[in-house]
Image: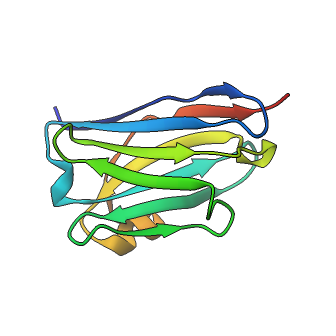
Amino acid sequence: QEKLVESGGGLVQPGGSLRLSCAASGFSLDHYSIGWFRQAPGKGREGVSCIVTTDNSTYYADSVKGRFTISMDTGKNIVYLQMTNLKPEDTAVYYCAAGGSPTSVRFGDGIDYWGQGTQVTVSS
């Protein structure tokens, strides 16, 4: 069965760090572009970061630039989102997604696979 599974979410204090993982099964991530999205309560979905596996180019939303880093381990078929200096406004459910084009994972349209999401809560 082809699926994406996120892990690594949790409760962290402001200024803390978390590393989210997005593990693929049933297909190879290096055939796709991969994105991370988040959705906070009462808000729309926001594209956070994405990586284009053909050239390893990356994109970050202005709200996370300099604090989040996306990376991929092709051997393990996992994409990571390292999050540092977390802020309360980073609180959301984080989803990973795989798409056939960079624009799909940049804007969330035409996604082939979505994960189930992992909760990140930043609070003191």
Q: Quadrant of residue 70?
A: bottom left
Name the residue located 63 percent from the left edge and 55 percent from the top edge. 67
Q: How many marks?
A: 0
Q: Nearer the viewer, residue 71 or 99?
A: 71
**Looking at the image, what colour scheme do you see?**
rainbow
Q: Quadrant of residue 78?
A: top left
Name the residue located 60 percent from the left edge and 59 percent from the top edge. 46
Name the residue located 39 percent from the left edge and 39 percent from the top edge. 115
**Looking at the picture, how far across and down is residue 101, in whole percent?**
28, 71
**Looking at the picture, how far across and down is residue 40, in whole percent?**
70, 45
Q: Nearer the viewer, residue 118 or 108?
A: 118
Q: Is residue 78 left or right of residue 20?
A: left
Q: Nearer the viewer, residue 21 or 16?
A: 16
Q: Is residue 68 above or below residue 95?
A: below
Name the residue located 53 percent from the left edge and 32 percent from the top edge. 118
Q: Is residue 28 left or right of residue 36?
A: left
**Looking at the picture, how far across and down is residue 124, in whole percent?**
85, 28
| Location of the N terminus (image quadrant) | top left
Q: Is residue 78 left or right of residue 88?
A: left
**Looking at the picture, how far across and down is residue 81, in whole percent?**
47, 46
Q: Is residue 14 above or below residue 72?
A: above
Q: Is residue 69 above or below residue 6?
A: below
Q: Is residue 31 left or right of residue 57?
A: left
Q: Nearer the viewer, residue 34 or 104?
A: 34
